[in-house]
Amino acid sequence: MARTWFITGTSRGFGREWAEAALERGDRVAATARTKGSLDELVRKYGDSVLALQLDVTDRQAVLDALKAADDHFGRLDVIVNNAGYGQFGMIEEISEQEARAQFETNVFGALWVTQGALPYLRKAGGGNIIQVSSIGGISAFANIGIYNASKWALEGFSQALAQEVALFGVKVTLVEPGGFSTDWGGSSAQHATQLPAYEQVRAQAAEARSKRVAHPGDPRATRGAILKIVDAEKPPLRVFFGTAPIGIATADYESRLAEWREWQHLAVEAQG
């Protein structure tokens, strides 16, 4: 049976690739973007299998209306993809209140509104998949994108709890954690805080470290088959990396954490009382 997908941020990047992957195999897609015109090519190519919707995920009522429109149009929802998001660059001291709130409004609250709004439709359908697009930056953290890291850590936290809450309904949650890919994440999609001269050296070091992490960026088209395997799996993973680099970063990070926790375990015991 053909599945119906609801994908945020479908104008480009992973959202566009995964929409086309679903459509090419005969599924249907409610494709959303901040600018509906960016979806015209998708509609021309796939016709009635696509429902194009203009959506700003930070508007909770608009999210609820879009989900209802998709369910009304297709009759069901099966796969929810929270892909809308962007990267905010800047040292923690440099981030303004407006920039911090905007990052969380899109990356955290936008995903939360879609998730909350979609669950009644997934329960009605008897189950389904929620795909949360996180990042290697959702389990690790890097200088000059700390507020972005914070938003993805928040997404990871509520999604892990969510997976436990909705398993009884047949709803499966997967956090996709990509490394560097040839998308526009660090280009026109990104936002940059006003720079403080005091951080010039740190900024240079962060840029050099990032260039090494993304020295061999992945091909977004190659993720098409991977995302289909996730939604088709009987028991999909809660977390999965996309790309070859994240496993090395995660291994070093978690080994370091465990070593430090063990080193200071005597203090943990003391604090127990």
Image (cartoon, rainbow, N blue to C red):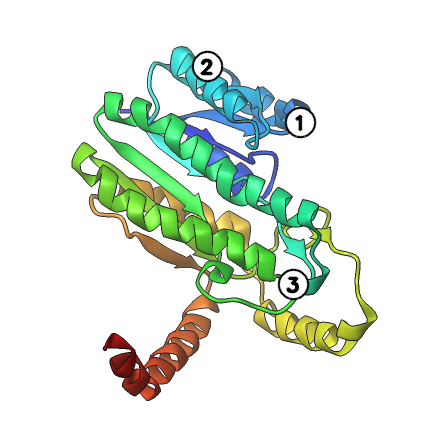
Q: Position of residue 196 (x, y in %)?
A: 80, 66
Q: Give the labeled residue for mark 3.
A: 92
Quadrant of the snapshot with the C terminus? bottom left
Q: Alpha-carbon neighbours of circle 2 within 10 Å: few (<14), some, or many (≥20)?
A: some
Q: Amino acid at mark 1?
A: Thr
**Of the residues under marks 3 and 2, which one precedes in the sequence?**
2
Foreground label between 3 and 2: 3
Q: Specify the farthest residue to the top.
A: 72
Which residue is pictured at 33% across the width and 19% down the height? Answer: 76
Q: Tell me the SS state at disc 3.
A: helix
Q: Amino acid at mark 2?
A: Ala
The one of 88 and 176 positioned closer to us in this rendering: 88
Which residue is pictured at 45% across the width and 26% down the height? Answer: 29
Res 35 label: 1
- How many numbered discs sit on the rendered protein? 3
Quadrant of the snapshot with the N terminus? top left
Q: Give the labeled residue for mark 2.
A: 69
Distance between the alpha carbons at the discs numbered 2 and 1: 17 Å
The one of 172 and 196 positioned closer to us in this rendering: 196
Q: Position of residue 173 (x, y in %)?
A: 31, 43
Residue 104 visible? The answer is: yes
Res 261 label: none
